[in-house]
Image: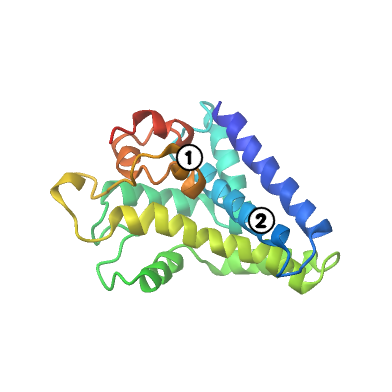
Amino acid sequence: MGVVYALLILIGWGTHLVYSLLYQQLELTDLTFWIHLLLQTWLFTGLFITAHDAMHGTVAKNKMVNNTLGALASMLYAGLWYPKLLKKHYLHHLHPGTAQDPDYTVGSQNFFAWWYRFMIQYITVWQVLIMAVLFNIGLIWFNEPRLFLLWILPSVLSTFQLFYFGTFLPHRLPHADAMAPHMARSQPRNHLVAMLTCYFFGYHFEHHASPRTPWWQLYRIKKG
């Protein structure tokens, strides 16, 4: 089922992006604009969640298929290099909530300061070049405002979504005894909210306790 869910997200993301770029009007007073913006943001988040599950080997039993889908999802998300993501995510699970955790900060835990430090862990020159090339290719068919509002902005907003529900809320101070040994907490049990906010990734203690459980099964092991 992991491959099925991965393909649904990949196809849904691509189909909705093309539809939005072709047909959505850029009217800020138009409710449908905001609906499509939020939906594309959520689908971008799904791309990264797919890449994340691939890092844990839960997208496909076949390693080549698993890593191919993970690499494709991370590349489509923002030109991210899958092997680098894999290496850093391994460290995150090995040293959660410590100075050795690349996703954590031992400095200011201000949301935006931490988000900035989180982002620079993964941004590379090659990523910027890839996105610049893709943006300029997109200009062949669409103007800059359309590309920015319907493609670039949702991808940026999804970084805040992923960071807030998948890093900031679960791992921020104070670290209570109940968070040990993963230095992680979970959002309250509400499967609809958990799905809409971050594909059940807000059930973060459960994810660290059972990293081989794919995102679409995390709700089954949520206890409290």
Q: Position of residue 110 (x, y in %)?
A: 32, 72
Q: CA distance from mark 1 to mark 2?
A: 18 Å
Q: Residue at x 27, y 52 (%)?
A: 96
Q: Taking 108 as reference, is 13 left or right?
A: right
Q: Position of residue 149 (x, y in %)?
A: 69, 67
Q: Position of residue 190 (x, y in %)?
A: 40, 40
Dot 2 corresponds to which residue?
35
The earlier-in-sequence mark between 1 and 2 is 2
**Is residue 60 positioned above or below 132 on the image?**
above
- Amino acid type, label 2: Ile
Say the numbered circle drawn on residue 46.
none
Is residue 187 something that shows in the picture? yes
User: Residue 172 lies in what quarter of the image?
Assistant: bottom left
Dot 1 corresponds to which residue?
192
- Amino acid type, label 1: Leu
**Is residue 59 positioned above or below 74 on the image?**
above
